[in-house]
Amino acid sequence: MYKLYESVKQLEQNASLKYGLTERIMIENAAAALEQEIRTHLETNDGQVLILCGSGNNGADGYALARRITGEISVSVYCAAEPESPGCIQLHADAVSAGVSFINGESFAECVSSYRIIVDCIYGTGFHGTLDGGIVRLLQKVNSVPCFRIACDIPSGIDRSGTIATLCLDGPLAFNADVTVTMGARKTALYSDAAKDFCGSVRCAGIGISSALFEIGQPDAWLLVPSDMKLPVRTRKSVHKGNFGHAVIMAGRKEGAAIIAGTAALNFGAGLVTLVDLFPDRRTAFKIPPELMCGTELPENTTAVLLGSGLGRNDFRAAGIAAAWLSADKTAGLVLDADMFYFSGIMPMLDSFSEKCPEARIVLTPHPKEFQSLMHLCALGDYSIQQPADNRLSFVKKFTKRFQHVVLVLKGADTVISCSNGMFVSTEGRPCLAKAGSGDVLAGLICALLAQGYSAEDAAVTAVLAHGCASQKAQSSYSMTPGKLIDAVSELGKF
């Protein structure tokens, strides 16, 4: 996994004091990283490059870049704002001395479509608030032309929290990068839901020292990678189904969701899976796979329970059943999903778990709308659905500070996992997961790992990564059904 920081200003100061890494050295190294990215995407040196420069040190990076490649690559600079910071003023003067070509607003409008690559060095990490009218028109124009776009540090228009405050008729506006080259360390802003469609591929570039020396201290979050998965691979040969736990799925009004979750749990290593039907007299419209057991009460050997998938919002008897069971089996696993986040008693329920069974392994898996309801019911504030999506790290931190004994999995374009040990971000999921049943699969995967004895944190991290990596097996951006997703998860641990 990689460290994520909201700001690297303190890290830069430390590097300057300890290693003599001056601001000029950092700027030159940032420019070198941008140069390398440009050369990677130019098949020959005859392509035209346009660099958009702002007034601060992000602009200084752009002027240094222009000076480095002028004479070898056809490059022009457009000054989006006059240089203001000392570094920017100096690098602008150096670019002028080197004979860098500058274009004005009129020339820009005429020739912007001729550039093969456009580099955004307007704001970087220093942006906050909304874009002014001139920058709005500039970004709308460069976003519309057919070229390869590179952002320096953070695409202009995205602030350090990951929020995009400037809204136009067609939605949020920021520089729409194909690649973002972020300097020194990865920034949390690049992994908000709002930023997802504007950052492209994210590459981290050093600015003069190794990441081990630069990234000191506790990060604000961690970026997960596939190697962080701890799949339930079986190494012992003399085993039986009882060695791998008994996962129970509480089947509510929409029993199809429970069947999906149960199938996922069985395919992810749970030795036994039982569907506990809260409405035993109904006639189900679904064919229940024969490998899933059915019952009307929790089996004695239950090791983990999933509550909420397809539960319905009118009958929360299952909450009392799960609470009584967990209070008796104080270290068991519990997954709360879907409709449970509309249960008016969820706050006292979680507080009771904290008091009576603090060692229980509890994971909550809301999507943004469910998280909005959860925050309200837990007296943590009334928010729009968009607010947590724009700045989800601060919201999940607020929830975890109040409920430190549970693990929160906030689903989204990038999924955030929060617990007392810190926050983790997974970027593996693909748009094909935006479909009914995908969340039930994830809940079932987590329940399976809890049933097998995983900690709540490890179960959440591994299940989220497996879920996301499996989505990458889809043949198109829309064709992944829950069944195909479960099959793809099963392939991850292939012999």
Image: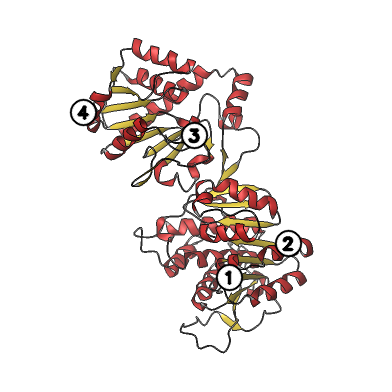
Say which element carries label 2: helix
User: Colour scheme of this structure image?
Assistant: secondary structure
Mark 3 lies on residue: 128
Where on the picture, by quarter, is residue 394?
top right
Mark 1 lies on residue: 308
- Specify the amino acid type for callout 1: Gly
Say which element carries label 1: loop
Give the alpha-carbon distance from disc 3 to disc 4, as whole Å.
30 Å
- Specify the amino acid type for callout 4: Glu
Q: Relative to residue 329, is residue 24 depicted above or below?
A: above
Which-is-in-front pick, marks 1 and 3?
3
Dot 3 crowding, Cα within 10 Å, few <14, some 14–19, many 20+: some
Closer to the camera, 404 or 347?
347
Sequence-wise first label, 3 or 2: 3
Q: Are marks 1 and 2 in contact (CB under 8 Å)?
A: no
Sequence-wise first label, 2 or 4: 4
Q: Are marks 3 and 2 in contact (CB under 8 Å)?
A: no
Can see residue 226? no
* Disc marking residue 110: 4
Query: Residue 17: x, y in percent?
Result: 63, 19
Dot 2 crowding, Cα within 10 Å, few <14, some 14–19, many 20+: some
Mark 2 lies on residue: 351
- Specify the amino acid type for callout 3: His
314 on left or right of 412:
right
* Disc marking residue 42: none
**Where's the N terminus, which quadrant?**
top right
Give the alpha-carbon distance from disc 3 to disc 2, as whole Å.
38 Å
Say which element carries label 3: loop
Residue that appears at 56% across and 57% down: 372
